Amino acid sequence: MELRKENILLVDDDVHVLEILQRHLQSLQYHTFKAVSVREAVIILKDTKIDVLITDLNMPEIDGFELLKFTSEHYPKMGKLVITGFPSIQDSLKVIKSGVVEYLTKPFTKNELIDALHKTLAQNKLVSDTKSTKILTNETYGEIIGKSKRIYHVIQLIERVKNNKATVFISGESGTGKELVARSIHYQGQFSRGPFIAVNCGGIPENLLEAELFGYVKGAFTGADTNRNGFFQAANGGTIFLDEIGNASLAVQSRLLRVLQEKEVIKVGSQKAEKIDLRIITATNSNLKEMIKNQSFREDLYYRLTVVEIDVPPLRNRPEDISLLADKFLYKYGLEYKDRIVKMDPDVLPILERYTWPGNIRELENILQRAIILSDKTVTIEALPESLKYNIPFSEADFISLKDMEKQYILKVLRVCNNNKTKAAEILQINRKTLREKLKD
């Protein structure tokens, strides 16, 4: 029997229930993921495309209702099926409001489970088919969050390339989410079953990058004690994402050009070519055209890599997305650090939207992560770093003389000492007579 394409996430604090659910669904060739808590479920949701969520309601720490509310906003296209051992009318109403199609009461039979799952999948497909403007109306696309025109343009390009293996080049400033775009291309398309391998070319020493990417044979160099596959072999059948491709040496660039031209890889120290079938996505925040002029990047490789170009906009050019991104981080780190959802004071958002974000989304995430640690239930202005808050723009051109600067400093010390000249003289490291003379002047 062929494996079904739907991914199903099972959430229940009872491991025996999880095993029963998984056994029933795997017998019908469904691909399942298991989580024993809402926290674990959220982690899986962020890393995996899930088609249907099957969750219990009554769980310790964070209950299933919180998970339903989260998924209804972050993953509105995902089907939801609830199972519970403690049914009530009030719970039923809350579940319906969360967009749940089916509601099963424990214990239930395998046939009842499969019937409810099929209804959920059918309803989910019906809703998806009737949403002709699904990308415009939803504020999430895979892991990408935003409603701005600039991010919508990025999503349109992803939709164009996700179901083919055209080489994609992603440009953008550091921290804009280039790897997130690469993951969306892979996981939103028809090749999502294959592996996704992300490689930071800037994080691997230059003398090791070639061996790590293409693999090596025993004896190829000192320390090569056995044959080993590289990242390209690991990504065969899926997608390899080469971040910071501008850091690759000319030797690695030459090998990469052969991969693109011949669809084959030769391990370091070998003469035998191995055929591969994968999609190559590259990214950088370097100016490759300038590197071509400096002869540090191959021009022929550049044109091979840029079959489709996607430019990820900096955060300062999409301020309408800041509130959505902030909500994501408040939820994520609220659960991680406080075991609850942390809110944000309304006065904080205008400050976040005014800031220019040189570090982009990564900087926003770090600032909110810190703010949540410093806050209780609500992130307030006090939790924000001083660099985000308004500063009076004093002109650095208004220089004063050394004599005037000395005068201002002496008066400042006197104010701190409540005009106690003896104490002020000690701080200034002069005697009282000298201080009196300076005050006369």
Image (tube, rainbow, N blue to C red):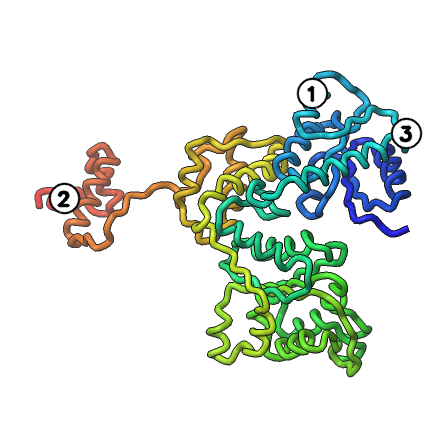
Which three-letter amino acid code belongs to the residue tagged 1?
Leu
Residue ID for mark 3: 109
Which of pointers 1 and 2 indicates the residue nearer the eye? 1
User: Which residue in the structure is indicated by mark 1?
Assistant: 93
Compared with residue 408, is residue 97 higher up or lower down, i.e. above or below?
above
Q: Quadrant of residue 336?
A: top right
Query: Mark 1 packing: few (<14 Cα in 10 Å), some, or many (20+)?
Result: few
Which residue is the extreme one toward the top? 89
| Position in image of residue 324 (x %, y %) | 53, 40
| Chain-order first, disc 1 or disc 2 | 1
On the image, the x and y values in percent for residue 274 come to: 79, 75
In the image as oriented, which residue stretches furthest toward the left? 440
Nearest the eye: 408 or 331 = 331
Q: CA distance from mark 2 to mark 3?
A: 97 Å
- State the residue lying farthest toward the bottom: 271
The disc, 3 or 1, on the residue closer to the chain's N-terminal end is 1
Q: Which tag, 2 or 3, sits closer to the chain's start?
A: 3
Residue that appears at 76% across and 55% down: 193
For the residue marked with disc 2, what is the amino acid?
Answer: Lys
Distance Cα–Cα, label 1 vs label 2: 84 Å
Structural crowding at the residue carrying mark 3, measured as other residues with C-alpha within 10 Å and reported as few (<14), some (14–19) or many (≥20): few
Look at mark 2 in the image and give the residue it sits on: 433
